Image (cartoon, rainbow, N blue to C red):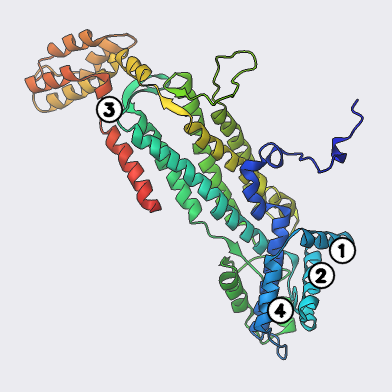
Amino acid sequence: MPTVSLAEVSPALALGPLDGRYRKDTADLIDHLSEAALNRNRIVVEVEWFIHLAQNSVIPGVRSLSADEVARLRAFAEGFDAETISTLAAHEAVTVHDVKAVEYTIKEALVEIGAEDLSELVHFCCTSEDINNLSWALGIKGATEQVWLPRARALIDSLADIAEELAETPLLSHTHGQPATPSTMGKEIAVFVHRLRRQYERIRNTEYLGKINGATGTYSAHLAAVPGADWPTLARTFVECSLGLTFNPLTTQIESHDWNAELFADIARFNRIAHNLATDMWTYISMNYFKQIPVAGATGSSTMPHKVNPIRFENAEANLELSCALLDSLASTLVTSRMQRDLTDSTSQRNIGVAFGHSVLAMNNLVKGLGQLAVNDAVLAADLDSNWEVLGEAIQSVMRAAGLQGVPGMENPYEKLKELTRGKRIGEDDLREFVAGLGLPEAETERLTELTPAAYTGAAAELARAAVEDWRVAQS
């Protein structure tokens, strides 16, 4: 048995991989969704509410803050550091209440700036959830806009570059795992550009809601203390103007978290599309449609020296599944609270950073994986040249059009091609002989005779370029 407990090692070891093995990929989220970030945002919210009340002379006879006092208070909030974390921990050890610890910490700061006469204005008429919901909204907003969206944009940018580069590279499609109408690799990648872009734009347009209306959402304490104040308007201007959030005018004790569920569903949907990308790229690599560029010094297998494994795509696949599992759980849990309040949201929300972290880690791996690929033109060309039967669709479609235009002998075109091609391997000579005997107009016969699987890609190249252009214009 081990003689040393790893829990006693200093500095402390991480239990989870996001704070251990993968920290470099997810560290940016710490500024927004960690416990420390939550407390920093609580201080910001409390300080701004304090300033809002004082500067709007909400309580008759209470003095306003000087410009210097306002500046020093905001500097205190912005200067949140390890010392602040220690102070909060010391207060919480006594209060056994995290938000009360924030209140006491701010009151100490008021003494430092000579404004202790206003100390009872801190947390005035607030329930803890007034502070918490706004702090989480600021954290989620920051994490989404400053970390998650840039990573998502980098992924779509990478795909757009590949789609543009390979817009005209012909590809044998596979529907149900069987050879199908050819496309281009660029067009197939552009499909993901288009799909991910739609979810990206939904997420970019997220509304981050907040409330500050008291213990059961009725402004009861507010009106008891200062009955002459227009509290709903004060609350709205604070949430919207001081914090840059969207005001929720009607709640219980908690902000209802519906917007959380909407955002998490959108991110989960983005994740699932990215998961589809990961599995498709893995499959293309296994078919040798893409070659992986070896990383100098890297080992693919501990026993098979030849291997270059698609680990970036496999890592992304697993982390996207973990992210979705958490996001789905959060979305379903957070929209339910017994009557006016229960605490199921409090512990659940502390896992939002984990859900975001697995998504960010996956996107980083997808971008790295995409950057280590080179298309294998020779294999793509050989596959196309081995599947001339996919031109059966083109031939029967031309026959249909000719029949509708009165050309004789064009009856049952689908059935004729089905008899020729279904379950059979046919070559170029077989198809050309078949086309020559159809009795099509000379121009159509010549066009079909010259057609090859590699040339039968329709508007794929144009569609790929259009999707890329749409994305780039939207980001400019």
| Residue in the image at 57% along x and 27% along y | 311
Q: 145 and 275: which one is in front?
A: 145
Q: CA distance from mark 1 to mark 3?
A: 69 Å
What type is the residue that disc 4 sits on? His
Would residue 446 be found to the left or right of residue 392 on screen? left
**Image quadrant assignment for residue 55:** bottom right
Q: Earlier in the sequence, mark 2 or mark 4?
A: 2
**Position above or below: 54 against 246:** below
Is the Cβ of the residue at disc 2 closer than 8 Å to that at disc 3? no
Assess disc 3: are there few (<14), some (14-19) or many (≥20) residues with their C-alpha within 10 Å of its C-alpha.
Answer: many
Residue behind mark 4: 222
Could you tell me if the residues under marks 2 and 4 are in contact, i.e. CB atoms within 8 Å?
Answer: no
Q: According to the image, label 1 marks what residue?
A: 95
Tag shown at residue 457: 3
In which quadrant will I find the C terminus? bottom left
Secondary structure under badge 4? helix
Sequence-earlier tag: 4 or 1: 1
Nearer to us: label 2 or label 3: 2
Residue 356 percent coordinates (x, y): 61, 46
- Residue for badge 2: 104
> Of circles 4 and 3, which is in front?
3
Closer mark to the observer between disc 2 and disc 4: 2
Question: How crowded is the residue under tag 1: few (<14 C-alpha within 10 Å), some, or many (20+)?
Answer: few
Task: Assign a secondary structure to mark 1.
Answer: helix
- 257 sits to left or right of 413: right
Q: Would you place residue 12 above or below residue 346 in this image? A: above
Asked if labels 1 and 2 touch by Cβ distance under 8 angstroms, the answer is yes
Picture quadrant where residue 438 is located: top left
